[in-house]
Image (cartoon, rainbow, N blue to C red):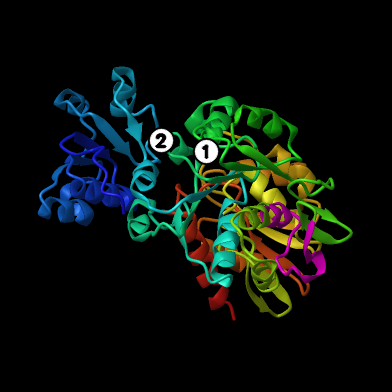
Amino acid sequence: MKNIKNFEHKKVLVLGLAKSGVSAAMLLHKLGAFVTVNDMKSLNENPEAQGLLEQGIKVICGSHPIELLEEGFEVIVKNPGIPYSNPIVHGAVERGIPVLTEIELAYLISEAPFIGITGTNGKTTTTTLIHKMFEADKKKAILAGNIGEVASEVVQEAAEEDHVVIELSSFQLMGIDAFRPHIAIIVNLYEAHLDYHGSAGEYAKAKLNITKNQTEDDYLIINADQSHLMELAKGSKAKLIPFSTKDVLDQGASVKNGHIYFQGEEVISLNEIVLPGEHNLENILAAVSAVKLAGLSNEAVAAVLTSFTGVKHRTQYVRKLNERKFYNDSKATNSLATKSALQAFSSPTILLAGGLDRGNGFDDLVPYLKNVKALITFGQTAEKLAATARQADIQSVVQVETMDEAVQEAYGLSEEGDVILLSPACASWDQYKTFEQRGDIFIDAVHRLK
């Protein structure tokens, strides 16, 4: 860990706790900053804040008082989920106070170079593939970021010869200043999170922050099948490494004669790859590009792609019961991810969907529902999705309150050979703390079926 002086003797406000906020506060305290933590949860119900208080860190809980801006903070480190419309954040921006997320801290203290992965869908699978390929090649890579490991915590143990493999959301990327991954990946770019960003243009701008500090010594791996993304990437100073599932490329990664090639070198046959779904080919090509640029062997690539069947909560196979197969795709928090999941199956499917209402409709799902024989829906978007199902001429539509009910109804409507798929097309926060919790509750309900 680099013992940086950037925050020494500076007043820093950590806004919002959760895991990343706790880690940021502790790190800043270690780096000599005068830290104040502000969290909405009351102190009595906030063991994380109580722990920070015991370490001598100033803690203010129960609200976000706008008066904090009068205390002369020089930097704010905010939880990625707190929007820029928050009065404190908005006021800080107006006053020219830097507003960062903790990945900026992680980058500043890390001895190791970063491989950063972003995109609308496929980030977690791509990140996991890269990490596993490093492991297969007996090279140390530290998994971090939006995949569940707090970057500013885990990179403290990173050595110069290691790599930090980090999944990055648009929320996190808005809060950077110097952050510069040596290898950056944008898996794909579609409209998403418009309730947070306000427009597709602002969302894209946030994603492109992953390359804003890169130089000609760095690499940007990018989806060449998306012309709009290629156009946006023209502003990058990094070496562009394209990948394509449709066209054969001399540079970058693509498919030719049933094999994956990287810069003209045959890497692996498609027949050997066990990860299901056409959408995962994008993730595989992006991952192969990254590890080949990092100097990993084809043997390491093959070791992972011939054994890795998927990430938990991402088209995850759960069990087979009475010739029905159950899949958990709880990480599908938008329509695009659900489209990809539905395309992975040709069998009759019973779809479980619904969740947080972000104001969008679901008409774009209609062409992908042709194999869906029944829809079980729940959460704030239950009626919207039911209307979409009727538009797609799905005869069986059932609205339920709980995941247990959803699983029971789905099983009751199923027949031998059917797929029962949880792919919500919505965020989980109306009923669950995280998509992981939602997926785990689904898995438990499936395993309780007799």
- Real-space Cα separation, disc 1 to disc 2, in angstroms: 10 Å
Residue 348 horizontal/vertical position (percent):
79, 63
In this picture, is 205 found above or below 268? above
In the image, the segment drawn in magenta is: 265-285
Q: Residue at x 84, y 48 (%)?
A: 248
The amino acid on which the numbered mark 2 sits, given as a three-letter code, is Ala
Q: Is residue 235 left or right of residue 81?
A: right
Q: Nearer the viewer, mark 1 or mark 2?
A: 2
Q: Which residue is mark 1?
A: 210
Which is nearer the eye, 372 or 77?
A: 77
Q: Check the picture and name the quadrant holding the N terminus.
A: bottom left
Q: Is residue 154 left or right of residue 191?
A: left
Is residue 32 something one can see in this rendering? yes
Residue 154 horizontal/vertical position (percent):
36, 58
Q: Residue at x 60, y 52 (%)?
A: 332
Residue 220 falls within the magenta-colored stretch = no
Q: Which residue is mark 2?
A: 178
